[in-house]
Image: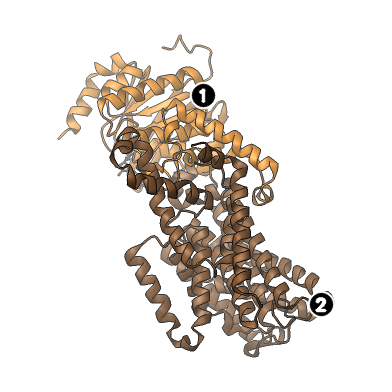
Chain colours: A brown, B orange
Amino acid sequence: MTFKKLLMKKYSRRVVNLISCILLISMVTLITPNISKAFTTIMITICINVLVAVSLNISAGSMGEVVLGQAGFMAIGAYSSGLFCKYVPMNNMFLEYLICIVVAAVIAGLVGFVVGIPCLRLRGDYLAIVTLGFGEAIRCLIENLDKITGGPSGLTSLPRLLNSSNRALGGYGAVLIAITTTVVCVGCIYSFMTSRYGRAILSIREDAIAAEAAGIPVTRYKVMAFTISAMFAGIGGAMFAHTIGSIYPSNFNLSKSIDYLVMVVFGGLGSYTGSILSATILSYLTIRLTNLAAWRLVIYSLALILVMIFHPKGLFGIKEFSMTNAILIVPGKIKLLFTKAQDAKNNKKETIIETEEVEETENNKMEAEDEEAKEAEALEEDNMNNGGKSDGK
Amino acid sequence: MENKYQGLEPLLRVDNLSINFGGLKAVDNVSLKVYPGEIVGLIGPNGAGKTTVFNLLTGVYEPSEGSITIDGKEMPKKIKPHEVVKLGLARTFQNIRLFKQLTVLENVMVAFNQEMKTNIFQSALRTRKFYKEEEYYKNKALEILSIFDLAIYASEQAQNLPYGKQRKLEIARAMATNPKVLLLDEPAAGMNPTETHELMEMIEYIRKNYKIAILLIEHDMSLVMNICEYITVLEYGAPIAAGSPEEIANNQRVIQAYLGSED
Ligand SMILES: Nc1ncnc2c1ncn2[C@@H]1O[C@H](COP(=O)(O)OP(=O)(O)O)[C@@H](O)[C@H]1O
Ligand SMILES: [Mg+2]
């Protein structure tokens, strides 16, 4: 009881998150004592995919509109970063990376804003098709503006800060920078989405007419969500450019957009921890199964179908995973198994609420344990984010 | 009636409001006045145009004729529903419209959005101001919820509330926008007598403590006759009678309209 109360305090949540964070990092370090090239690639790819999936979750999950052009925004980010590197060569790779990220975010955000204003008047299938068209249009544009973008032969020999071969920091530094970028970005997104803005965006998804009647300027907030989503996808694109060092229009085709949508749906539309976890799992599988590349789409579709059958709302539904809640609720669940009837009668209401949460969080926890090592940074973000998610229960 | 509000400015004043849908005059020359602390009933058979009046008042439709004045300020003809909220009009819906998957607390917090001040950067970076504001409005939301006996459900999803409580939550959300005029569209629909009685007391409480003008559409005649001081009756979009509950109850034209429409 007192322990429970202590855990419910605002700051103890942060302590819990910090401790689990440190535990996970040390676990990952123990499992992988030497940073191999393959490990670097996996970690950085996961970071990029987590960021882009989370950014897509803003529009597809929280705003509730199917967006099929996220790779288009990524392309804009990647190409603005690449072109910036090309025309403004710099000696300090790290500074260059930072500037590239800002440039990519601004340009992708601007495009998102301009595209969003007319498109967001549409809803549902219509919006999905328009965004699909947008993604493809961007790709064609890049392919045909070959004087600037290099066309189908791409932009090559760009600086590769996020790569084990970089001279400045080495593989470990690269992974650290990628993780930091993703954690900071995802942290900002999560804070934004749990603020008044996020609440307003969720209310629009739930009922746009009621949201307007409650004083929410629906169109403005939709455009805002779309713009922010595009901005962070752009940052993901810039990271991608800094990983591979050469970018081609074909990197950002429709199937890439669909990959990200699958990740978001798989994790649960609207759940940020869900997106993080599923992006981690799916990226890991994709990389590990490269020799089964032809089967990738089959695996994705199968995963999606299985989730749809057994857990139609995705892994987490719209809920978020929280370490403190897991600690708070799991012992309660075990206790509940032992002292079934009596307690249940006494405080009926309380247990009803609790069991619901228990089931959800329990599921999450089990999955989290299975994937623990691989989703190191995923949970890190999770933990960081939950630092602020303190009030609620 | 008139004496009680003598010399006062009405909070809501509607003059000769009309709208056509194609050939149909859904609202035909309706005029209303609601004073601070007054509850006015808007009744009439199904399809009489009551909800359409609300939609005109809240900017969902643009009136083809007539004017709407809130607290002395005339409402522009072209206005968006979210801007109407800023002028001090709040409404509930005939078919409940809640943010179903959000918590009860969040449902009310959404309505505070228009008066909250933290900007995007403060929100994304979680500055001290962000936490302070969240805390302040959370407490304010809980205050409003406790008027409606909903505070204990604060962290429950809105869709899990029983029907009667969902209706109350909708009123709570409307109250959170700090309105001057509250428009209630059939708030007692689907409620049992106990719930209706509770609702009546809550509306009475709001009227007394907030001094706002309440315009009420309702089919439950006992409720209307009990709490409304003035009633306007619509039929086929046009007002056919207006007066105190007693006058309306004995009005031949009204009785006819109601009997005629029943099947
Ligand atoms: N958007 C619309 N387009 C066409 N007709 C409408 C529209 N909204 C309402 N109506 C018509 O206006 C009339 C009044 O409807 P309403 O205001 O909902 O009645 P009630 O008094 O039952 O609330 C009905 O005949 C309805 O069919
Ligand atoms: Mg109606």
- Is ligand 1 within 8 Å of the beta carbon of the residue shown at mark 2? no
Which kind of residue does numbered mark 1 sit on?
Answer: Leu
Q: Tell me the SS state at disc 1.
A: loop
Left or right, residue B218 beside residue A6? left
The Cα atoms of the two marked residues, 2 and 1, are separated by 62 Å
Q: Residue at x 26, y 36 (%)?
A: B46
Residue ranking furthest to the right: A91
Taking the image as four quarters, which one is ligand 2 found in? top left
Q: Looking at the picture, how far across and down is residue A393, in whole percent?
A: 49, 41
Query: Which label was assigned to residue B11?
Result: 1
Q: Residue A122, percent across and down?
A: 47, 61
Counting from the top left corner in percent of width and height, residue A316 is at 44, 58
Q: Helix or strand or loop: what does disc 2 sit on? A: loop
In the image, is B221 to the left or to the right of A249? left
* Residue A287 vertical placement versus A331 (above, below): below
Residue toward you, A290 or B219: A290
Residue furthest left as drawn: B263
Q: Which residue is mark 2?
A: A88
Residue B183 visible to the viewer: yes
Cβ of mark 1 under 8 Å from ligand 1: the answer is no
Residue lying furthest top: B3
Q: Mark 1 — on which chain does it sit?
A: B
Q: Nearer the viewer, residue A36 or B206?
A: A36
* Label 2 chain ID: A
Q: Is residue A290 left or right of residue B21?
A: right
